[in-house]
Image (cartoon, rainbow, N blue to C red):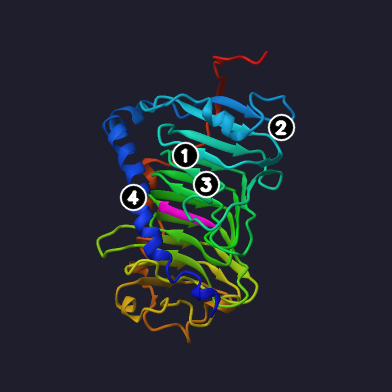
Amino acid sequence: MAEMGLYKTKSKHYIDTYYQITIINIFILSLITSSSMASSSSSVDFSTAILIRVDQSGKGDFNNIQEAIDSIPPNLNNSQLYFIWVKPGVYREKVVIPADKPYITLSGTKASTTVLIWSDGEDILESPTLTVFASDFVCRFLTIQNKFGTAGQAVALRVAADNAAFYGCVITSYQDTLLDDNGNHYFKNCYIEGATDFICGSASSLYEKCHLHSLSPNNGSMTAQMRSSATDKSGFSFLGCKLTGTGSTYLGRPWGAYSRVVFAYSFFSDVVAPQGWNEWGDSSKNNTVYYGEYKCYGPGADRRERVKWSKQLSDEEATVFMSKDFIGGKDWLRPAPSHFKAALKSNPKE
């Protein structure tokens, strides 16, 4: 149980910092953009984007990813899509997408050959290799790694903005790999690897056809969702996913008292502990958490030894978690652009 005790002080530290920093960032963004979102988002031409190329060989517009992001002007009127195409290579940098730059797509060529890597740890908010503060962000075919190791919190990806989607990405670390912080998010065909609470946060997220791989030697946890009240709409839904790993792991444990996580139509290898879910040392949360399974299969899906406070969902109960409506996705998910135009360079290379 040593691994399960790593975060006894995690909630207080995170919540204090979260409300002092994260909510301030999101609140500021909402003040700036909320008045323009409704009227302007419908006018965005989703078929066409300004193309910015990142290539370490020097044949692109920029040699690293952050330079490409910094080149994009604040886009508070949401009138233009930007598509950053990252050529194959290992990019050793910490990247931040600022809140005033919505509608960016960051795309590798293939996740196996396009790698963003950094090594930082011990602070859940400062360690991420990639941090997303901008709304309407899309990431495709990119590997995002934090190589800090097993010594503490080490976030690979932090998503602290509304309307973010990730397709075909590989996200790896050990502790708190994916800080699915807040907002509505969508992950499809992604590979997510870690050991302790490696998908955590208070977002509303749908994970479709994703592969979750646990590195925990004993009693780790795949999720630590942070829903804080019965009226909070947040939660993690895993649809058609695959769960594998070494050792044993729980499906989740409650970071927040009303933590909500559902797995549907997913394959559970024998890495899933028979109890399925862990109360994180606080049995009072057993009456408020919402942990459900629906038509999952595989050796780890046997519910005979599951904790009694988890649920085998009915058809009606499961329906709400198996649609993009769970994240309001029909209103904001967009296809990849089909047409591109070159960016205007204010400072051309000599």
The span picked out in magenta is 177-181
Mark 3 sits on what residue?
166
> Sequence-wise, which precedes: disc 2 or disc 1?
2
Question: Is 84 displayed left or right of 252 in the figure?
Answer: right
> Sequence-wise, which precedes: disc 4 or disc 3?
4
Q: Amino acid at mark 1?
A: Phe
Residue 301: which numbered mark, if any?
A: none
Mark 1 sits on what residue?
137
Mark 2 sits on what residue?
56
Q: Do tag 2 and tag 1 residues touch (Cβ < 8 Å)?
A: no
Q: CA distance from mark 1 to mark 4?
A: 24 Å
Quarter-wise, where is residue 262 in the image? bottom left
Q: CA distance from mark 4 to mark 3?
A: 27 Å
Mark 4 sits on what residue?
20
Residue occupying the point 30% across, 63% down: 228
> Sequence-wise, which precedes: disc 3 or disc 2?
2
Mark 3 lies on a secondary structure that is: strand
Q: CA distance from mark 2 to mark 4?
A: 37 Å
- In the rendered image, the residue lying farthest to the bottom is 305
The residue carrying pointer 3 sits among few (fewer than 14), some (14 to 19) or many (20 or more) residues within 10 Å by Cα, namely many
Indicate which label's residue lies in the foreground, 1 or 4: 4
Mark 1 lies on a secondary structure that is: strand
